[in-house]
Every structure is written in structure tokens, then in C-alpha cells.
Amino acid sequence: MSAVERVRAAYARNAEAGRPEAWITLRPEAEVLAEAADVDRRVRAGERLPLAGTVVAVKDNIDVAGLPTTAGSPAYAYSPAEDAPAVARLRAAGGIVLGKTNLDQFATGLVGTRSPYGAVRSAWDPTRISGGSSSGSAVLTALGVVDIALGTDTAGSGRVPAALNGIVGVKPTIGLVPTTGVVPACRTLDCVTVFARELNLAREAVELMSGPDGVDPLARADAPAAPLDARPLVAVPTAEHLEGLADGWAEAFQGVVSRLAESGVDIVEVDIAPLLEAATLLYGGAFVAERTAAVGDFIQEHRDLIGTEIDPTVAGIVLAGTEARAADYFRDREKLDRLGLEGLARLGGAVALLTPTTTWHPTLAEVAADPLGANSRMGRFTNFANLLDRSALAVPAGVVDGRPFGVMLTGAPFADRTLAQLAERVAAPPVELFVVGAHLRGQPLNHQLVAAGGSFVAEASTASDYRLFALATTPPKPGLVRVDGDGSSIAGEVWRLPARGFGRFVAALPEPMGIGSVRLASGSSVAGFLCERVALEGAADITRFGGWRAFRDSVA
């Protein structure tokens, strides 16, 4: 669709999605439409814009010119004159920024609840957390409001919320994407990350943003890893490191391991205890002083705001670094080096370590009851990556108990493309589904598509050999039937669902509905709702309305 059409669809989807807390600043629709019209004009003029028709959300610790940067604290807000390079490069490719997203304050947390702007709720279950700290970015991507969202990652903030919301989260090698214009959490460990519903789009965004900017002293040029061997070796944790996972997750993980093995990957079990011990240094040692260096002075100067505009849990973590001494840091640095050497040596020739992305998906109430303990459980497999200069990629791997389950591949620096190749073997390709009735956006059953991980793709119509009937059901539903003659084109929508979400969705369909192949006006065919002819007895033929929405409007 054109950029203008995509922007209109984004604002409509945002109104339906029911997650206002995911935004801190949402740009006026008219302003964004004007920007989209310019993108469409440039495309018509022959300019190559690889992200034309793509809408973007940006975590509110990354600068967007003209919008305040708050890092999740109203008192901290400032107005940047320029886009961060990561944002500027996406915009130069035709991406259109809708606004700035909510986060765990100062990017300190993996839960998505530590914000005076409100706790961000899961895209799948509003009683559960979104994960953080890139909470709003992940949820808006999962709900189909945006195509790409930027986050940041120091301890897992670009991976944990991806897993909990059933989307892709790319944490590039440190320095590939400049962090100029990013409020630091731990400056030497921070990464700009990407969320998307599709791996290829997420990787394209990373490629577009990569490269030194001449300002960030930690930015570095790419040094791509060698291509995968014919039978790559992937390490997985031994059983004791998978204890304490949410119910069903260990079994789901073993299913992913089996799929990888069947795809031609050799699997080796590894005791990753040194890596997990290294992970504890991020918050349990002197490294936390880097957070104090970043925003500790601001919190000290605004102690009177703790409990209102400054989250008390975040304040406690950041100010704890004032107690660290230089000697403590160098002792911890040596300990990290030794643990890293031992842990990475145990991986041997493995090109990646495969783990669950996180360990559980708590409710909002569980996190409120134990803010530190609940958060600590989230980062078991993520916390060591940036400390040891690893690349990482989180991908959806199915649904357990009605909620997403995700896995993570962690590899050497600059192994980003290698991890993407492996990730393609983990997840089955998504399925496109054409809907014509109660599952359309704004209709009473649309939530079922969203709960199955679905995302809106485009409005579409069938070829001209279908008829539409109003069935006597509760809630009201139409029946779409293909005919040999005297048919018409019927309006609907195309949605994209992960393979497992599609399977779960189809299994729950009541009679007389079924899924078959629907031919679209474009000439392509996709899966879609079709109705058994036996159900049409006594049903009203509503083909003349051209679609379900027009019929329902006439009834109203």
C-alpha cells in the first residue's frame, strides 16, 4: 500500500488496539499524512526508498527531532534538534515515524511496568506484562500498529519484550548501529535494537541503520562472519539450566531443538554456568556504576520526585552504583574476563547458543508484588550478551497456554547474519489469511486474530466469483461462497499469522465456518474463510452490499 494508506491504517489500528499506555508521544495524524504524501511523491518521481510504506515507532530514549525525549521521566525531558542517526537513516529510506514509545524508566528493567506514564500491558493478555524496557515498541509492533519499532538493549530490553509479544527482536553487535542521540543506560553496553513481525524486515532495518557516524566513539564497521557450514553446530543448555521455566516452556524449547536438528543442524549440550554467572555481574557488581554515571546526578538532584515522576525501583538501582569503588570495578572486570573465556570455550565450535529468550511471563500483579525478584528472573539468558560482546536474535517459536513462547540465538560479534540464517530454520513461515466478517478490524471477533499473533496486512477484495450471505449466528457473521457464475467481488482484509497461531485459530473455528483457498482480485490466492453450503439455507444474500461492513452499516 502507499505511504498515505499505511499511515491511515496505522492510526485506525491504534484506535482499535486498546494500548494507549504504549505511547508517550503520538504525532498528529494530519502531520504524519503530509510526510507520507511526500514519500509517495518521491517514489512516483523514481526515487528508491526501500522502506516506503513502512511506519515506525521509536523508544523514548532515542532522539526524534521535534519530539521530546523523556527516557520515561517527564522531569528529564528535552527537545532534540536532530534525529538520532538510527532514526535519520530509517527516515532517509522512506520510513515514517508515528511517535515515541513508553519504556521502563531510563531503560532500567525487563518488565515494562517502571514508568510514570503507566505499565504497558501485553499485546496478547492485558493482565500480563509487556516485558521491557522497550515495552511500548514491542507491543505496538505485535498489535500491527507499526511495522518496525526501535528499542535499546543493555540487559535484554530488545529481546525479552519480543519474546513475550510473539515478534522478532534483533540485538546487533555492539557498535554496528551508532548510539548517538540515545540516552545512555550503560554507555559501553547499549545497543539500538529493532522489533518487527518478520525477520527479513527487522534485518533490513538493521542493515540500513548500520555504520559509523563519526560521532559515536564506540561505533564500528561491520566485519561479517563466515557463511554457515553445511551442518552448523549449535549449543543448547544442559537440563539444569532449563529448570524453573514457565509451565510448558521446557517442552516447547525441546520442540525447537528437534526442529533445528531435523533441518540439518548438529546439537551439542553445554554447561553454560560460567556465562550465567557472568550475567549476574551486570546488576550484582560494580558495572551498575555505569548507570549511575549516566543518570545518577539527575536522580540525586530530583530526589523529591522519587515515587512520582521518578520510579523508586529505578532510582534504587541507579543510585546503588554510588557505592561502587574503582577497585571493585577492576576486580569485576577481571572476573568477567575469566568467566567469559571459560564460558565461550565451553561452546567450542558452536556458531550459536540456543536458549529460551526468558524464563516466564508474569502478571502485572506478580511484578507489583516483587518488582526486583520478578525482573531478575527475566534476564537469566539475556544479561551476559552485551557484557561479553555477543550478537543476539530473539524469534517467536510457538504458543504455550495461549501466549507466545520465544527462543534466542546468541553468537559471536558480527555473527548477526549467521544468526538470521539459523533463525529461519526455527520458525515456520507465517500464513496469510483473508477475512470478510466478524474478524475484520473493529468487529467483535477481531481480538481472536490478535490473540493468535495476527497482524493486519492490507485491505483487499476477492475475485468476482463469490457471493456473501448473512448467517443467523451470534455474533452476526457472513458466509462467503465461491460460485460458478453470477458472482461479485467482496471486500475484506488480509491478515498475517504465525504458523502455530494460525493452527490454534483454525482449530477453534466453529461450524459451519472453514478455511479454504480464496482467490483475490489481484490474481493471487490466500487462505480464507469459506462457508459450508448447508449453512446457507434461510440465510440472506447480501452480495449487493459488496462487503460485511457496508451491510452492517445498512442494518444500523
Image (cartoon, rainbow, N blue to C red):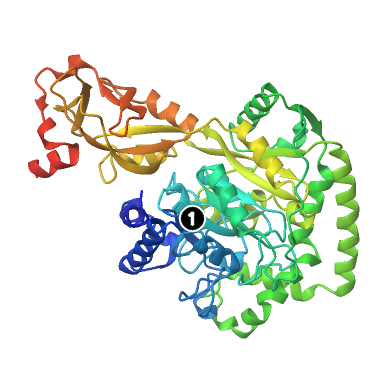
Where is residue 175 shown, x and y percent of the image?
Answer: 72, 61
* Amino acid at the residue labelled 1: Arg
Where is residue 436 shown, x and y percent of the image?
Answer: 25, 34
Residue hosting label 1: 48
Which corner quadrant of the image does residue 243 belong to? top right
Where is residue 548 shown, x and y percent of the image?
Answer: 18, 37
Which residue is outermost to the top?
534
For the C terminus, the quadrant is top left
Residue closest to the eye, 226 or 392: 226
Which residue is outermost to the front?
46
Which corner quadrant of the image does residue 531 belong to? top left
Task: Note whether residue 294 is visible.
Answer: yes
Residue closest to the eye, 434 or 225: 225
Report how many numbered discs are placed on residues in the image.
Answer: 1
In this rendering, the answer to whether 139 lies above or below 551 is: below
In this rendering, the answer to whether 448 lies above or below 149 is: above
Where is residue 223 shown, x and y percent of the image?
Answer: 77, 52
Q: Residues within 10 Å of mark 1 (few under 14, many from 20)?
A: few
Residue closest to the eye, 307 or 46: 46
Q: Residue at x 80, y 29 (%)?
A: 268
Task: Report whether 147 appears left or right of 338.
Answer: left
Q: Residue at x 32, y 30 (%)?
A: 523
Which residue is outermost to the bottom?
301
Query: Which type of secondary structure does the marked residue at label 1 adopt?
Result: loop
Task: Note whether residue 380 is visible.
Answer: no
Task: Report whether 38 appears left or right of 485.
Answer: right
Task: Report whether 405 appears left or right of 269.
Answer: left
